[in-house]
Image (cartoon, coloured by chain):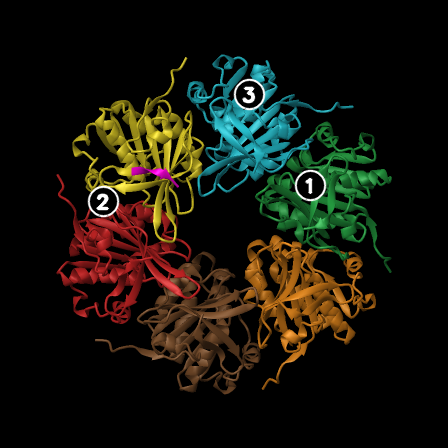
Chain colours: A yellow, B cyan, C green, D orange, E brown, F red
Amino acid sequence: MIDSFVRKDSGIPGLDELLEGGFPYPSVILVAGSAGTGKTTFAQRFLFAGAEKGQQGLYFTTLSEPTQWMLRFATRFSFVNRDYFGDQIVYVDLGTAIRDAAPAEILSAIDDKIAEVMPERIVIDPITVIDVPLGESYRSFLFDLCNRLKNWKAVTLLTGEVPPQELYPPEVAYSVDGIVLLHNSDEGDGRRKYLEVLKMRGTNHVTGKHSIEITSEEGIVVLKSQF
Amino acid sequence: MIDSFVRKDSGIPGLDELLEGGFPYPSVILVAGSAGTGKTTFAQRFLFAGAEKGQQGLYFTTLSEPTQWMLRFATRFSFVNRDYFGDQIVYVDLGTAIRDAAPAEILSAIDDKIAEVMPERIVIDPITVIDVPLGESYRSFLFDLCNRLKNWKAVTLLTGEVPPQELYPPEVAYSVDGIVLLHNSDEGDGRRKYLEVLKMRGTNHVTGKHSIEITSEEGIVVLKSQF
Amino acid sequence: MIDSFVRKDSGIPGLDELLEGGFPYPSVILVAGSAGTGKTTFAQRFLFAGAEKGQQGLYFTTLSEPTQWMLRFATRFSFVNRDYFGDQIVYVDLGTAIRDAAPAEILSAIDDKIAEVMPERIVIDPITVIDVPLGESYRSFLFDLCNRLKNWKAVTLLTGEVPPQELYPPEVAYSVDGIVLLHNSDEGDGRRKYLEVLKMRGTNHVTGKHSIEITSEEGIVVLKSQF
Amino acid sequence: MIDSFVRKDSGIPGLDELLEGGFPYPSVILVAGSAGTGKTTFAQRFLFAGAEKGQQGLYFTTLSEPTQWMLRFATRFSFVNRDYFGDQIVYVDLGTAIRDAAPAEILSAIDDKIAEVMPERIVIDPITVIDVPLGESYRSFLFDLCNRLKNWKAVTLLTGEVPPQELYPPEVAYSVDGIVLLHNSDEGDGRRKYLEVLKMRGTNHVTGKHSIEITSEEGIVVLKSQF
Amino acid sequence: MIDSFVRKDSGIPGLDELLEGGFPYPSVILVAGSAGTGKTTFAQRFLFAGAEKGQQGLYFTTLSEPTQWMLRFATRFSFVNRDYFGDQIVYVDLGTAIRDAAPAEILSAIDDKIAEVMPERIVIDPITVIDVPLGESYRSFLFDLCNRLKNWKAVTLLTGEVPPQELYPPEVAYSVDGIVLLHNSDEGDGRRKYLEVLKMRGTNHVTGKHSIEITSEEGIVVLKSQF
Amino acid sequence: MIDSFVRKDSGIPGLDELLEGGFPYPSVILVAGSAGTGKTTFAQRFLFAGAEKGQQGLYFTTLSEPTQWMLRFATRFSFVNRDYFGDQIVYVDLGTAIRDAAPAEILSAIDDKIAEVMPERIVIDPITVIDVPLGESYRSFLFDLCNRLKNWKAVTLLTGEVPPQELYPPEVAYSVDGIVLLHNSDEGDGRRKYLEVLKMRGTNHVTGKHSIEITSEEGIVVLKSQF
């Protein structure tokens, strides 16, 4: 017999109310959107929300970007507490492995790191960049990755960058337990940003687009009035 | 001489009335929709509706997802009676076979399992994920699979995930006896969900989109008023 | 000197009036539409209309579907007289030949069967499924097939399944003598079905979309009032 | 010094008035449209208009269709005088050459036939079917073909079948001297047919879509009132 | 120190006013449009405008079309003075070189001819046909060609034919100094023709679509009132 | 500990106010737009704004265009002070390297030049042309290039030319720290130009499209009133 769901709060004000309290724990969640929609901010807010509660975080970047470079931009947000970095939020560069290693080795590297850190919250940001080095193995890698992640007691956020007009990367959508869309919509009198929970297994989530704001304090805030 | 149709109820309240009583028995039915439209819930409701009547079920997953993981999310729905699982609804992971075996061997594995379990209701969920490992053999595999399934005395539901804006996966549509579409439509003031019976051989089915609700009790409910 | 046209009635009430009496005899006609538009019903109605008049029919299926399976669904329609089957309407499974034989052999198999049965009405249903096994030879096979069929004294209906939004399969359109489209149109308040004669050589056919109904008695009925 | 243009009448009532009297002589003209727009009727009317004036015609079919088959359908039109066929309008099947011969040989076969018949009017119907057997050589074949045809003192009509929604086959458009489009437009209350002269070198042609009718007497008639 | 721009008039009445007096000299300009928009007429008017002022012209055709064939159609326009042809406007057929020579040899042939003729105005018409024989080398050939042309003291017009609905051929757009679009727009009550200067380096050009007329006297005339 | 952001002014009047003062320093910024939207002018204005303040600039062109050719067109703008060229703004032709060298060598050449010049502002214009010579290596080259550039203390602008209707080149978007779009919008009564900051890491940038003007004095000016 399995108890009713444990959930992890997202850290995004207003989002957990759409999700019956947060992301199912464990689960694998896709956060998808085009350039500039706030995917990385979303993922970082999620990790820091955990760190504030003493939950171990693990942040895989696929961009080969130095920690300092990433932190420079992140510190615009007041939720980013640099003291958490390195210890409570372990930052790992997957870029080199992705370029040089075989898919099975990359999966092992990810597994090994998770086993070492034992995080409750994991981010892989962005997952979609992996299609360049992996080529034909990309889709089966995503499939295997999601299955591996389901063996761990953690909520994993995969961020996925899509071209404008695409909603989400279809090649990973069927393997994840939840999909959160970040929209950047051109409405004539300016771009508006929206968040939408498209899918969340085991959750009676609120549907439809919700206006969001990017703020220095919280990163992303879901506004009350639904569009 | 063949008698008039035996039908299997879908388990979805309101759907059987659109289908002259249910799915033709035997038949192969495609349930298609984009991410988050409720395909898996549809398929599970169908299996449990059978189990409640003592009809043997067989649930093939192509996602290599552990039973416990799937059940965790399914138990949100009150129709999911865990006691049925393992015995009245046999759960089989096709993921490993799909990755490592040749198409003919996968077909044999499916056939062997059906012969062993002798189900009246079969689900393969999702069928569309098979295109990754099978590649060029994907379409002929689907063709052969549907023909094999037609040799058994069962209603088989194949779930098919399509990108947003696509109605159904065309490469399997001509081989199935029925197609049920699940729509997730962005209508400005929110997403609405619809169900539509696009094709049902031997059945004078009701056409057009029907509003559906996702509920904790029944999974999916077809609302009376048609859109 | 060739006399004025002999025509074969379609069996579809209301259609022959659009066609100056029926399909030119001999001719090769494409019946195209997406899933669930009634292509198979159209083709079967055509064969039974002939059988009722004592005209020999020949029904090639490319789906490897057993006769009984097909008949089960067909018998929903009261025009389907099972006594005609086997003798006046010969049912041939092309599925095996298509998978294992070279294009030239498939053409010979079709020719041989036609020579044996000497039908006045032929159906190949659906023709579009052949692209899977034939691959690159698909288009030249269609070209050769149509030319072979023109050597016989018969009206041949080729059914062609297209993805939604496509009108007809262009790779066969230029080789046929007539094209009948079956539309399944989403008009907000429900799907409507239409039939349209797009092309009919030697015939001053009525143009435009015509509403059709699927009925248990006749299969397909063209309604009088044009859209 | 070249005199002002000699022109060949099209045979289509109402069209020559849009063309300053007819097609430039010599020239290569593309007649493009989707299935059922009347391309073959256009081309045949053009040949018979010449035959009536004693101008030699040459009709290449790429469809491997027997003369009798084509004539059967053509004789629906009263302009088709079967006596002209064989002598004043030579009918040549290119289908076999296209399948079995190299591009250079096909060009030679066409050239040889033109040299033998010395036509003032040539039709190749349809040109677009050649892409199947020629594959990668298709576009350079079209290029060479048009250049070869420009060496002859004749008006050549190439008919080109395009999928619905495409205006003309772009791979031949830059090599021809004129383009006539045949539209088959779905306007809600029925399909309307239009003819449009998109390009005609050396000619101050009338632009825009013109309604046409298919009639048994003339084949195609351009109606006076412009759309 | 470079003086303020020398410009070459286009020869098109009304166009130079949009261009601060004409095309920058030297420069490479793309004139793009679909079939029948007047690209060749534009290019010829440009050459004859130069010839009238004693400026040497060089006209490369890629169509392998004999001079007489081209002239026949051009002489419809009263600006075409045949006396200029051969001497003040040298006409060169690139067709053979393009088919048989390597890209580097074609570039050398163009360079050699320019060095021999020393033109102030060059036309290559149409440039887009080169993709057929060059295949994969097409884009790098365009890149090299534009760079070679920038070594000469001339205004070069490249005409580019695009399918309907495309604005310009993107594979050459970044290498040219200016882009002039010729639109052939279907506006329900007929096709209208427009000219638009999309890009002109070093020039504060007038933007937006301008109605044009095709006239026998001038070829193309830009009308005053802007759309 | 990293101090709050240093920023580099863009040189574009009105833009820095949208960017909390300018581009983050260091950072890699993509400036994307279709032909004729002002990408090169944007990049040049940025370099000259630095030169005016004594900040070293480095301008990589991928077009193999001679300095004099580029300068000729640039000097239309009064902000272009030719005295800065060669010394304070070093101009480097990458064209030859891109054609002949391996990706790793091109990256080294760029790195070496940056190490030699030690610029605070770098431009690579346009980056999108590199896909021709690099082919399959293009995307991983972009990925590596961006990572290399992040090792330097400079703001780098990459200009990206996209076909009309595309917003930005997706293959580089995830690797850059900021994206500025230049729109060239057809609004019936003429083309309007807009600038939009789609993404700017570490910056609470103003969103939405802003009208811009091309002026001889400043190159590009962002108008106050937002669209």
Residue F96: horizontal and vertical position, in percent? 30, 59
Disc 2 target residue = F202
Q: Is residue A2 above or below residue A192?
A: above
Q: What amino acid is found at the position of numbered circle 2 in the picture?
A: Gly
Other-residue count near label 2 (Cα within 10 Å), few / some / many at <14 / 14–19 / ≥20 = many
Can residue D223 be seen here?
A: yes
Could you tell me which chain the residue with mark 3 belongs to? B
Residue D12: horizontal and vertical position, in percent? 71, 70
Label disc, if present, on residue E204 of the rendered structure: none
Other-residue count near label 3 (Cα within 10 Å), few / some / many at <14 / 14–19 / ≥20 = many
Numbered label tally: 3
Disc 1 target residue = C39
Q: Looking at the image, is mark 1 or mark 3 nearer the viewer?
A: 3
Disc 3 target residue = B47
Q: Nearer the viewer, residue B210 or C61?
A: B210
| Quarter assignment of residue D174 | bottom right
Q: Nearer the viewer, residue F55 or C205?
A: C205
